[in-house]
Image (tube, rainbow, N blue to C red):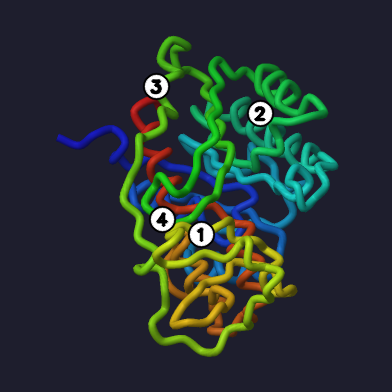
Amino acid sequence: MINKDQLLLSYGSLFSGAGGFELGLNKLSWQCKWMNEINKYPRMVLQNKFPGIPVYDNIYDVRGKELSPVDVIVAGFPCQSFSQAGLKTGSGINLFNELTRVVSEMRKEYNKPNVVIWENVPGILSGQGWMSYIYSSWCKVGAMVQEHRILDAQFFGVPHRRRRVIGVVSFGLRAERAGEILVIPQGSTRHLKKSLQQKYKAAPSVSKSSSPIAFHLKQDPISSTVAPSMGVSSEGIGIYHQGKLRKATPVECERLMGWPDNHTLNGPNNETISNTQRYKMIGNGIVAPMVTWVGKQVGPFV
């Protein structure tokens, strides 16, 4: 007997980045019908790793009624304006509005999607009334149930402290079952050594001033958050490895995200993508095993 979370649910992806949601949900055999990404290098990765799936460009030009209808829409609307690095300006709310618009247009035309899964940084929970605005916006487009939780990547099989808000919006789920969706697991196994490259090209060293965000295999086997700025500054994840302090390589950062090795290395015509752009894509991404877990939780309710 096939569990419902293993059925061939269809989904579309907005603000897809380099495909973290896709990597996680494809583990469940969910079928991606379309993606959306405006930035050049993430688009190249999507076109390379998910050939044959349409990648729409500017969200402002996407029309929900013109997309293939799907059971679920996933969206990691840009988080920089809600993060500490972005000084919490909140300008990402404009892009959130585009998410609700696309969902509303599709539901008016097809009565789908049944569920929306969104992701952002914990900063969205503080100040400016952003969450109140988000909840009221979903109510205006017909949502019956909403739930959100802060999930930490380190509890989903990767040695990586990365806290993210996951929101689930349902247009049909019974309210009394909502609390079951995002029940956080008690813990899981994660091994930093499995993330390390034993053979790697020289990576930039991490300055002594960066040592507070460095980690040691024996003393603290879980890394801090992979940041998109790692490729353009001395800051970043430092690893005490083989007696030296060095910056984590792009492949190691991909492993910390639960992504395949060199997922971000090439475009559709085998173009090589620079490490600077790879760090940026990885740092802006979502941990794939966490997405898989969320998909398993949501699947039975779609």
N-terminal-most mark, 2 or 1: 2
**Marker disc for residue 158:** 4
Q: Position of residue 227 (x, y in %)?
A: 65, 61
Seen at 58% across and 75% down, the residue is: 247
Q: Is residue 218 left or right of residue 202?
A: left
Q: Secondary structure at mark 1?
A: loop
N-terminal-most mark, 4 or 1: 4
Q: Is residue 68 left or right of residue 188?
A: right
> Label 3 sits on what residue type?
Glu
Per the model, the C-alpha gap separating discs 1 and 3 is: 29 Å
Per the model, the C-alpha gap separating discs 2 and 3 is: 25 Å
Per the model, the C-alpha gap separating discs 2 and 4 is: 35 Å
Seen at 42% across and 60% down, the residue is: 221
Q: Position of residue 98 (x, y in %)?
A: 74, 38
Quadrant occupied by the C terminus: top left
Per the model, the C-alpha gap separating discs 3 and 4 is: 23 Å
Which of labels 4 and 1 is toward the front?
A: 1
Q: Which residue is mark 3?
A: 180
> Label 1 sits on what residue type?
Ser
Q: Secondary structure at mark 2?
A: helix
Given the current orientation, which residue lies at the most extreme top position? Answer: 176
Q: Which residue is mark 2?
A: 104
